[in-house]
Image (cartoon, rainbow, N blue to C red):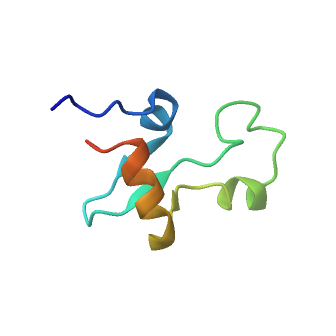
Amino acid sequence: MPKIRSHSGTKKRVRRTGSGKYAVKRHSRNHLLLQKNKRQKRLNRTLTLPSTEHHRLRGLVPYL
């Protein structure tokens, strides 16, 4: 039985937390941070994905 291929784009964007949930990093947090206001920077922290997305992500990255 061959191994399942993981989606390489999803591997780079999604990680597992200690409790088994999936977490993604939001956009707008890499560069040009001096001209962005504090609210915009505060709201763009790591996002925990809801449990309804777990089934879809298990197919994309089965070994994560």
Residue 64: image location, x then y, percent: 29, 44
Answer with the quarter of the image where residue 22 lies: bottom left
- Residue 27's x, y, as percent? 68, 43
- The extreme bottom residue here reads 51
The residue lying toward the viewer, choosing from 47 and 20, is 20
Residue 33 percent across, percent down from the top left = 73, 38
| Residue 53 horizontal/vertical position (percent) | 50, 63
**Measured along the vertical axis of the image, is residue 40 above or below residue 62?**
below
| Left or right: 31 as drawn, with respect to 19 | right
Q: Nearer the viewer, residue 28 or 34?
A: 28
Q: Is residue 48 left or right of residue 62?
A: right
Give the side of residue 3 with respect to residue 47, left or right: left
Q: Residue furthest front?
A: 1
Q: Is residue 36 above or below residue 32?
A: below
Q: Residue at x 62, y 49 (%)?
A: 26
State the residue at coordinates (68%, 61%). 43
Count of labels in the image = 0
Q: In front here: 35 or 61?
A: 61
Residue found farthest to the left: 1
| Between 56 and 1, the one nearer to me in the picture | 1
Q: Quadrant of the N terminus?
A: top left
**Residue drawn at point x = 81 percent, y = 45 percent:** 36
